[in-house]
Amino acid sequence: QVQLVESGGGLVQPGGSLRLSCAASGSIGSVYFMSWYRQAPGKQRELVASITPDKMTNYSDAVKGRFTISRNDAEKTMTLLMNTLKPEDTAVYYCNFLAGPFNYWGQGTQVTVSS
């Protein structure tokens, strides 16, 4: 059974940084898209960043220039480096792996940006 486990969330002051990690366990096979999503209270889940196997990246306008996504296919891991965090970045962050016909989600990790 495949599981995605996120780590690295927490409370940080505005302007601070956090690094989120996502690791897959189990036999997942080749992963195509790896993505981070987030969901703030009362809002829909939104795509934050994604990365393809050839390391092409895509970011939402809200995080472009502040967040960096990366992946390690040998270890089946993905990270999201978040800099210059703002209160509006507060949300539960989810990792997502698309592997063949399967779409895997992590359980989410809370990021709170507050002074």
Image: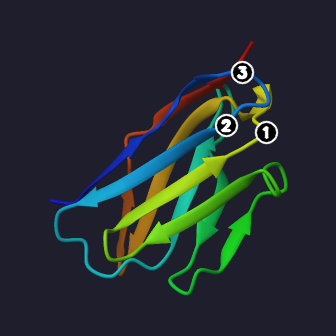
Q: Within 10 Å of the Cα at label 3, are there few (<14), some (14-19), or many (20+) other Cα atoms?
A: some
- The disc placed on residue 17 is 2
Helix, strand or loop for disc 2: loop
- Residue name at image x 45 percent, y 79 percent: 32
- Mark 3 or mark 1: name the one nearer the start of the chain: 3
**Residue 36 location, x and y as percent?**
56, 55
In the rendered view, tell whether residue 99 sits above or below residue 3. Answer: below
Q: Within 10 Å of the Cα at label 2, are there few (<14), some (14-19), or many (20+) other Cα atoms?
A: some
Helix, strand or loop for disc 1: loop
Q: Quadrant of the N terminus?
A: bottom left
In this picture, residue 71 sits left or right of residue 106: right
Residue wearing tag 3: 13
- Mark 2 or mark 1: name the one nearer the start of the chain: 2
Helix, strand or loop for disc 3: loop
In this picture, residue 99 sits left or right of residue 32: left
Residue 38 occupies which quadrant of the picture? top right
**Residue 91 location, x and y as percent?**
62, 32
- Residue name at image x 35 percent, y 78 percent: 101
Q: Quadrant of the C terminus?
A: top right
Residue wearing tag 1: 84
In the rendered view, tell whether residue 78 sits above or below residue 95. Answer: below
- Residue name at image x 82 percent, y 49 percent: 62
Q: Amino acid at mark 2?
A: Ser
The residue lying toward the viewer, choosing from 81 and 57, is 81
Instruction: Tell me, yes or no, whether the two marked residues, 2 and 1, touch with CB atoms within 8 Å.
Output: yes
Q: Amino acid at mark 3?
A: Gln
Q: Residue furthest bottom?
A: 54
Q: Residue furthest top?
A: 115
